[in-house]
Image (cartoon, rainbow, N blue to C red):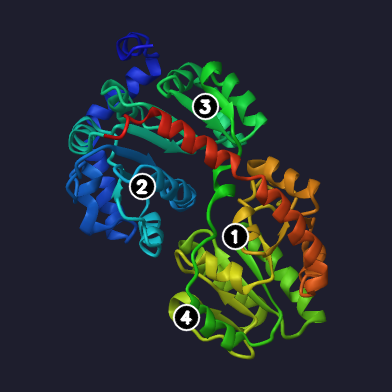
């Protein structure tokens, strides 16, 4: 299908969106400036959001890769490194939307030939400036961050497009089910759509995605290199913690933390020197985390990373409210609850990616609500590579049991068997992108 055909067949909802986007710059300006005043936008780089590049475009081929925030962009880094190895003549432009993603990427040494910029807002002028400057030879979008105007601009320039590592959450499905024609039309702009699992394949098909472009390739992040380490900082923390037992609650949401602190309190009855490291998913929630922890355990027994608090012998909860240090916490803890999967009375969470923990030999605990990563957890359980806990009592028991290397060993071995199978998404994405690029000169 040519771009002209696509343009003629635009659904009414897409046409309405494009019309509104012409009127949206004042609203974008208000929103971005308000966020900047609150510290949620990088004021020094705000011009990038309007399509004004802060760096020149290098000569030669350029792949534009996009991940909305920390998880999506980090999932691309191993693929980016492999692409640079295969095509050192090619520059990678990595765009994200959130300030947290830029901060996380700044803590990792991006390979030579990789440039980070913020994604422009989806207005005509911003998109035109962005595309005129960077002139991508290929576009790869991670997950499902679909901005119609910029996708159309890439398609109009004849840029091959691939959607990577995407899946359909229940919320995303409900939202897009209201407009299957618009969703299918946007999906058809891509040359290939790589979905994580068979369920997502079926749901995307139901949402109008073209069958000939859909393929199940697995979870790209599962094939990612281990999260980075800070050996000097880890040595300091190991010294402070000493031989104390410890566990990690990773990427938690505020609504589940009462249960997590309940589990920790019960585990402390068996292991009074147990240390809980808790890394909230959103840094803005850390105040709530701290208030709840202090209420449960006492102010003097709660320390906070962002404040520079030391871990002392009486510290029972260490709040790891920092960006880009999750690799540090997984290396410090023998066992981790991988987040956002405990049952709640009025909310269903969808779980978090378990393979960051697996890659660092950290035993995985999780609750029953893991719909967003169901296939990943099913594969781990098929090999005995993760432990399901239904409530705070079971989590307390598991945390205490997992302090024993003998208890952890079979779970870690099973997880490693799954990890060895996880290279397919990376290899497939690499093969597809290299096949779409112009030949090296």
The residue indicated by pointer 3 is 176
Decide which of tag 4 and tag 2 comes sooner along the chain: 2
Q: Which mark is residue 232?
A: 4
Q: Give how far apart the Cα atoms at labels 3 and 2 are.
A: 21 Å
Bin the neighbour count of mark 3 within 10 Å (Cα to Cα): few under 14, some 14-19, many 20 and up.
some
Bin the neighbour count of mark 1 within 10 Å (Cα to Cα): few under 14, some 14-19, many 20 and up.
many
Q: Are marks 4 and 2 in contact (CB under 8 Å)?
A: no
* Vertical relation: 232 (above or below) 256: below
Q: Give how far apart the Cα atoms at labels 4 and 3 are.
A: 47 Å
Where is the N terminus found, in terms of image quarters? top left
Question: Considering the numbered disc 2 on the image, is that residue within a helix, a strand or a loop?
Answer: loop
Q: Which mark is residue 439?
A: none
Which of the 4 image quarters holds residue 169? top right
Where is the C terminus found, in terms of image quarters? top left
The residue indicated by pointer 1 is 252
Question: Considering the numbered disc 1 on the image, is that residue within a helix, a strand or a loop?
Answer: strand
User: Residue 276 or 215: which is nearer the viewer?
Assistant: 215
Residue at (37%, 20%) from the top-left corner?
14
User: Residue 334 or 70: which is nearer the viewer?
Assistant: 334
Q: Are marks 1 and 2 in contact (CB under 8 Å)?
A: no
Residue at (52%, 86%) from the top-left corner?
310
User: Residue 174 or 109: which is nearer the viewer?
Assistant: 109
Decide which of tag 1 and tag 2 comes sooner along the chain: 2
Q: Give how far apart the Cα atoms at labels 4 and 2 are.
A: 31 Å
Relative side of 436 to 286, left or right: left
Tell me where residue 213 appears, x and y as whole percent.
Answer: 51, 21
Q: Nearer the viewer, mark 4 or mark 2?
A: 4
The residue indicated by pointer 2 is 97
């Amino acid at each position: 299908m040519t771009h002209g055909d696509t343009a003629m067949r635009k659904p009414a909802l897409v046409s309405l969106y494009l019309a509104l986007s012409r009127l949206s710059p004042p609203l974008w300006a208000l929103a971005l400036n308000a966020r900047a005043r609150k510290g949620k936008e990088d004021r020094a780089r705000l011009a990038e959001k309007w399509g004004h590049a802060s760096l020149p475009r290098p000569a030669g081929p350029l792949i534009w890769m996009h991940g909305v925030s920390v998880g999506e962009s980090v999932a691309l880094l191993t693929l980016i490194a492999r692409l640079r190895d295969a095509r050192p003549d090619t520059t990678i432009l990595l765009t994200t939307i959130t300030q947290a993603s830029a901060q996380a990427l700044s803590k990792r040494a991006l390979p030579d030939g990789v440039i980070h910029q913020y994604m422009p807002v989806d207005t005509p002028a911003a998109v035109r400036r962005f595309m005129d400057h960077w002139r991508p030879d290929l576009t790869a979008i991670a997950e499902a961050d679909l901005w119609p105007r910029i996708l159309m601009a890439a398609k109009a320039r004849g840029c091959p497009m691939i959607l990577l590592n995407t899946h359909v959450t229940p919320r995303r499905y409900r939202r897009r089910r209201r407009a299957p024609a618009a969703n299918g039309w946007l999906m058809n702009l891509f040359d290939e759509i790589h979905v994580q699992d068979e369920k997502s394949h079926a749901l995307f098909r139901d949402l109008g995605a073209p069958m000939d472009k859909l393929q199940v390739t697995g979870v790209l992040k599962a094939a990612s290199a281990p999260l980075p380490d800070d050996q000097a900082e880890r040595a300091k923390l190991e010294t402070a913690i000493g031989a104390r037992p410890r566990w990690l609650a990773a990427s938690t949401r505020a609504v589940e933390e009462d249960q997590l602190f309940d589990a920790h309190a019960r585990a402390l009855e068996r292991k009074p020197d147990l240390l809980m490291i808790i890394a909230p998913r959103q840094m803005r929630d850390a105040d709530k985390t701290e208030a709840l922890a202090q209420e449960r355990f006492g102010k003097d027994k709660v320390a906070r990373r962002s404040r520079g608090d030391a871990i002392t012998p009486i510290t029972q909860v260490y709040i790891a409210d920092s960006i880009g240090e999750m690799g540090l916490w997984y290396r410090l803890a023998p066992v981790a609850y991988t987040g956002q999967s405990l049952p709640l009375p009025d909310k269903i969470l969808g779980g978090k990616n378990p393979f960051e923990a697996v890659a660092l030999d950290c035993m995985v605990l999780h609750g029953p609500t893991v719909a967003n990563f169901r296939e990943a957890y099913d594969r781990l359980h098929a090999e005995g590579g993760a432990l399901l806990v239904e409530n705070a009592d079971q989590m307390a028991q598991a945390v205490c049991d997992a302090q024993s290397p003998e208890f952890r060993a079979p779970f870690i071995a099973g997880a490693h068997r799954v990890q060895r199978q996880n290279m397919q998404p990376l290899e497939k994405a690499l093969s597809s992108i290299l096949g779409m690029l112009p030949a090296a000169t």
